[in-house]
Image (spheres, rainbow, N blue to C red):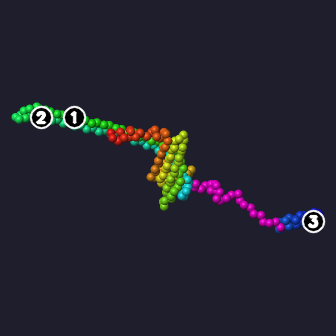
């Protein structure tokens, strides 16, 4: 019994000596407050300059216009035969009629849908976000550029950081195209000249 106690004292002595001579050990956490997903329940919507925001474009517009114009004019004149020294002048009459009529119609329909990402360029004092975005798609020699700008209320931004184009104040959505197909859709110079003259 005495020898067992002595052995335990020796073991405990070594353990104490080891603990006293060991250098301090520091541990670092695997969790960082600034890491991705650090705030699982925070608001990840755009709210500052430089933040990205996704625009869901869904626009549908149509316009119909018809016009008609008509104009008519008739004139007539007559002259009796001459008498006296003018007896050689025979009786004469003339008439003129003019009639003009024109009709025209214009039907325009546009449907735009898509998604693109814009950037916050300014935050107004009331918290509204000024956004600007541009997207260029090039395919088979055709180049299409979509640009969106406007002002977004922070209340209109969905939890997944998207906003409908219909919720953008002073929205300006512009679509430009360059290439063979876009060129075929334009009128020729001669056609435009005749449209201008007539």
Nearest the viewer among 152 and 134 is: 134
The spot of residue 178 in percent (x, y) is 49, 43
Find the distance from the CA under tag 2 to the CA under tag 3: 157 Å
Residue 39 part of the magenta segment: yes
Q: Residue at x 58, y 54 (%)?
A: 44
- Taking 52 as reference, is 72 left or right? left
Q: Bin the neighbour count of mark 3 within 10 Å (Cα to Cα): few under 14, some 14-19, many 20 and up.
A: few
Q: Which residue is mark 2?
A: 79
Q: Earlier in the sequence, mark 1 or mark 3?
A: 3
Q: Quadrant of the C terminus?
A: top left
- Mark 1–mark 3 Cα distance, whole angstroms, equals 140 Å
Dot 2: what SS? strand
Q: Which mark is residue 6?
A: 3
Residue located 10% across and 33% down the image: 89
Callouts 2 and 3 close, C-beta under 8 Å = no
Quick check: 185 above or below 8?
A: above
Which residues are drawn in magenta?
Answer: 21-44
């Amino acid at each position: 019994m005495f020898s067992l106690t002595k052995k335990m004292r020796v073991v405990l002595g070594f353990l104490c000596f080891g603990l006293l001579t060991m250098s301090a050990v520091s541990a670092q956490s695997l969790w960082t407050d600034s890491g991705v997903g650090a705030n699982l329940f925070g608001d990840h919507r755009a709210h500052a300059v430089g933040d990205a925001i996704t625009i869901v474009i869904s626009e549908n517009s149509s316009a119909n216009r018809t016009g008609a114009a008509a104009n008519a004019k008739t004139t007539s004149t007559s002259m009796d035969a001459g008498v006296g020294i003018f007896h050689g002048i025979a009786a004469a009459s003339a008439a003129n009629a003019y009639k003009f009529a024109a009709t025209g119609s214009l039907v325009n329909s546009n449907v735009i849908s898509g998604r693109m990402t814009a950037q916050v360029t300014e935050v107004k004092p009331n918290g509204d976000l000024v956004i600007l975005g541009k997207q260029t798609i090039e395919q088979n020699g055709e180049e299409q550029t979509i640009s969106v700008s406007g002002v977004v209320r922070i209340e209109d931004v969905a939890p997944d950081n998207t906003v409908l184009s219909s919720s953008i104040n002073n929205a300006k959505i512009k679509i430009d195209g360059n290439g063979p197909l876009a060129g075929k859709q334009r009128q020729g110079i001669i056609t435009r000249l005749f449209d201008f003259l007539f």
